[in-house]
Image (cartoon, rainbow, N blue to C red):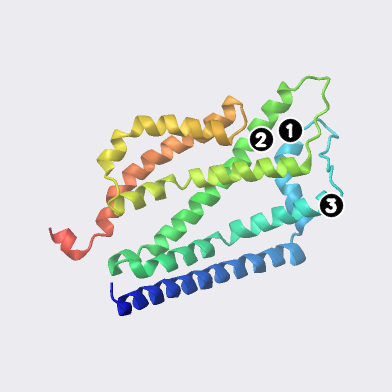
Amino acid sequence: MSEEQQSGTQDTFISHLVELRSRLVKASVVVLIIFGVLFLVWPGPAAIYDFLARPMMAALPAGAKMIATGVITPFLVPMKVTLLVAFVVSLPWVLYQLWAFIAPGLYAHERKLVAPLVISSSLLFILGVAFSYFFVFGTVFKFINEFAPKSITVAPDIEAYFDFVMTMCLAFGVTFEVPVVVVVLVRMGLVTVEKMKAIRPYVIVGAFVVAAVVTPPDIMSQLFLAVPLCLLYEVGLLLAPMFVRATQAPEEASS
């Protein structure tokens, strides 16, 4: 490789790094702005954490409360919850910055579908978090607290509760992205729909393995994660051919 080619390659790499930094800064600024609004204006960290704790509080005996074992935990945990909510609210903008960074390497007929991918990815992630909060938490917490011996006083620590909730919300949010992952893999030509159908049994086994790793060691939590993962995989297989046809270049469609 000549010196001019090496210089051009280095300049291209540096320009990509500059563009990536710019996209990360833009995404971070919006997250921080939304965090500031949630923290200073409405509804406030305490109210947000109370909302997050509602499924656990509903499952606890009457009059029971969660505890904070650290000195500054009552301040730090609501702050972390507020930052997490700010990230979820700003997720469409964050994903748009990601796709905008990738878009220059796409063809014109592929770039027009950046918006649908951003919207669907955001909605699916939020739907996964909502499914975890409104359906899974209430069922799992009620089952665990009813299973606990009567001689035990259930008083969860707020930091441990936040870590558990964050892990579960992230797991369900990522799980609900499975259709997007399947569609993108098929469109990029990395795998065919027929191959994805052929490996369906391995996907089912993998879904239960993943559920066993990221969820509590009770069968209900594992089923709540593994079953939607398998169903969403099938949804991705149904949507992939339509997406491929919609993003075909004119010469591909004619051939």
Residue at 54%, 42% in the rendered image = 172
Say which label, 1 or 2, has the lower sequence index: 1
Cα separation, mark 3 vs mark 1, equals 26 Å
186, 134: nearer the viewer: 186
Say which label, 3 or 1, has the lower sequence index: 1
How crowded pointer 1 is (Cα within 10 Å; few <14, some 14-19, many 20+) is rated as some
Q: Is 239 rendered above or below residue 61?
A: below
**Residue 116 position in % (x across, y down):** 40, 60
**Mark in front: 3 vs 1:** 3
Q: Is 204 rendered above or below residue 8?
A: above
Q: Residue furthest bottom?
A: 4
Marking on residue 138? 2
**Residue 29 position in % (x across, y down):** 61, 70
In this picture, residue 59 sits left or right of residue 24: right
Q: Secondary structure at mark 3?
A: loop
In this picture, residue 193 sits left or right of residue 40: left
Marking on residue 59? 1
How crowded pointer 2 is (Cα within 10 Å; few <14, some 14-19, many 20+) is rated as some
Give the residue at mark 3.
Answer: 72
**Residue 214 position in % (x across, y down):** 57, 36
Q: Kindly tell me whether residue 224 is visible in this rendering.
A: no
Identified by mark 1, the residue type is Ala
Identified by mark 3, the residue type is Ile
Identified by mark 2, the residue type is Gly
